[in-house]
Amino acid sequence: LTKMEKGQANFTLKGFLNDNLLITAAFDSYSAKAVVKSQAMKLLRPGKTVVLKWLRTGTGPAYTTVRLSYYRKKPLAKPIQAGFTVGRKYTVLRAPGEGGDNEPPLKLVPQTTFQRGQVVQVTVTMTITAPRHFVVLEDPLPAGLEPINRRFKTSTQAYQPKVGAGYFDSRWMQHVEIRKRRVLAFANYLRAGTYTFTYLARAAVPGRFRARATRAFEMYAPEVWGRSRPLSVRIVTK
């Protein structure tokens, strides 16, 4: 970039989508702030070719990035296995002593209906049949669940993930991100096998919600990927 960016930048850039003016931006330096434009997909017709053209007038190189994102009205119900096999289940946890001394312990039975305030264990499994590099595991949360980040001192420590012997292994990931609406785990390298990732969430808002499919993919080869089935979740008041 240093070799290309010689002299003074002074140009105007116009973008056209199917000959319709989409964006116009003027730049007078290489450190100028990037200009972002979002366009609704109503200009894009299914099955029709879309032509995006750029017209630059002036001096200096122009750098552009185009991203397309969409949401299906009817999410695909079938899982996809294109290098990864991904599964997800929700179970209810109980803190020690919660429910009384005579209350039988909760069994880890997958379910999708929860009472408001309950702590939910999210268990994601990922199976690969060949070594994978720079793996990303992304699990979206339904709107009624809030993730619990147990690294925070303000988060409850009473609940501990419960899994079967030999089933839980969190040593495979190098980095974890707990965000408001999704949880991500990253691994630099994985051998062929089955890997499990478990975290906690709380049922916070009553209603019916949809959990988008869990995805796993190679960061630098996104065509190697897989996803689980989407789930419908119901949260009720006590």
Image (cartoon, rainbow, N blue to C red):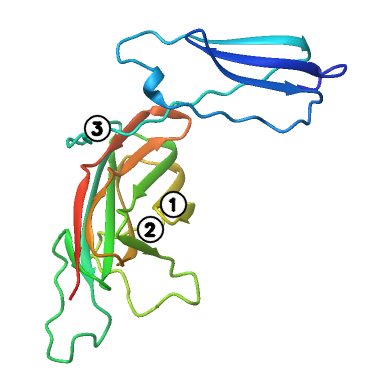
What count of labels does the image hold?
A: 3
Q: Is residue 164 visible?
A: no
Mark 1, secondary structure of its residue:
loop
Query: Where's residue 156, x and y in %?
Result: 40, 77
Does the CB distance between marks 3 and 1 fall below 8 Å?
no
In this rendering, position of residue 9 left or right of residue 180: right
Mark 2, secondary structure of its residue:
loop
Displayed quadrant of residue 41? top left
Identify the residue under disc 3.
81
Q: Residues within 10 Å of mark 1 (few under 14, many from 20)?
A: many
Question: Residue at (81%, 19%) from the top-left corner?
Answer: 9
Where's the C terminus, which quadrant?
A: bottom left
- In the rendered image of this protein, does residue 69 appear above or below residue 232? above
Identify the residue under disc 1.
173
| Mark 3 or 1, nearer chain start | 3
Query: Where's residue 192, x and y in %?
Result: 32, 39
Does the CB distance between marks 2 and 3 fall below 8 Å?
no
Question: Residue at (64%, 29%) from the top-left corner?
Answer: 35
Query: Where's residue 204, x and y in %?
Result: 31, 67
Q: Judge by depth and name the residue closer to the eye, 221 or 57.
A: 57
Identify the residue under disc 2.
170
Question: Residue at (23%, 33%) from the top-left corner?
Answer: 80
Of the residues shown, which amino acid type is indicated by label 3? Gln
Work out which residue is located at the far bottom of the displayed protein and give it: 101
In this rendering, position of residue 40 left or right of residue 15: left
In this rendering, position of residue 180 left or right of residue 7: left
| Mark 2 or 3, nearer chain start | 3
Displayed quadrant of residue 215? top left
Of the residues shown, which amino acid type is indicated by label 2? Ser
Mark 3, secondary structure of its residue:
strand
